Amino acid sequence: MVKMTMIARVTDGLPLAEGLDDGRDLIDAEMYKQQVKALFKNLSKGQNEASRMSVETGPYVFHYIIEGRVCYLTMCDRAYPKKLAFQYLEDLRNEFERVNGAQIETAARPYAFIKFDTFIQKTKKLYQDTRTQRNIAKLNDELYEVHQIMTRNVQEVLGVGEKLDQVSQMSSRLTSESRVYADKARDLNRQALIRKWAPVAIVLGVVFLLFWVKSKLW
């Protein structure tokens, strides 16, 4: 059964639409929504290159497709056929591109296409019962294959993002510290030069002063 549906722009992770009644009967619905947002964040950083993927999380699976820099994601029970889940997403993609395609790049606020929920709910109802003649026909459609779509664990996927973030933060910190060390090294070199040449400068100054005084007296 389809439990949750969300659509987001891949370039910046901006949520564009979602099923408004999704998660009402779902335990820990907020936790799963946070995982979805984390996935969108990873995708916006280019950390998952696959355009189609299934991500296991507890008793559910996130399925997503990326087309035209938009991610269409749904969460289903593990027992729900993968083939139907991806065909459901394809239906959403086709309609979303047809209705909102020209405005996707210019959308500036979250859930700018929230009215798309009407189509989400209508389409979700068609896919809920896997035993209908329509859905059985889709399951038997040999032209639509999902065997090659990768399946990963949510901790593995999000963990990759966290590790890359840590590496990025460490790199920034090392760069900052290297600048501090470089500044300190320049100061130490300057002080060493002063200590080295200051006595010579003082002696030359005294000699010059003596010559000047002597010339005045003569």
Image: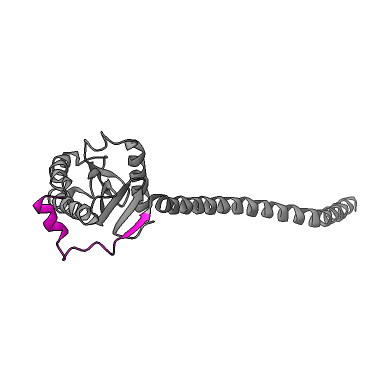
Q: Quadrant of the N terminus?
A: top left
Q: Residue 144: name its quadrant.
A: bottom left
Q: Kindly give the residue lying farthest to the left in the view shown.
A: 133
- Residue at image x 79%, y 57%? 197
- Residue at image x 21%, y 40%? 19
Residue stretch in magenta = 131-152
Q: Is residue 151 magenta?
A: yes
Q: How many marks?
A: 0
Q: Is residue 160 left or right of residue 189?
A: left
Q: Position of residue 128 (x, y in %)?
A: 17, 45
Q: Residue 14: name its quadrant.
A: top left
Q: Kindly give the residue lying farthest to the top in the view shown.
A: 24
Q: Nearer the viewer, residue 163 or 84?
A: 84
Is residue 69 in view from this perspective?
A: no
Q: Position of residue 126 (x, y in %)?
A: 12, 46
Q: How is the image coloured?
A: one colour
Q: Nearer the viewer, residue 69 or 134?
A: 134
Is residue 174 in view from this perspective?
A: yes
Q: Position of residue 8 (x, y in %)?
A: 27, 47
In the rendered image, the vertical position of residue 171 relative to residue 1, given as above or below: below
Q: Nearer the viewer, residue 73 or 15?
A: 73
Q: Is residue 203 magenta?
A: no
Q: Is residue 183 left or right of residue 51?
A: right
Q: Position of residue 185 (x, y in %)?
A: 68, 54
In the rendered image, the vertical position of residue 141 relative to residue 120, given as above or below: below
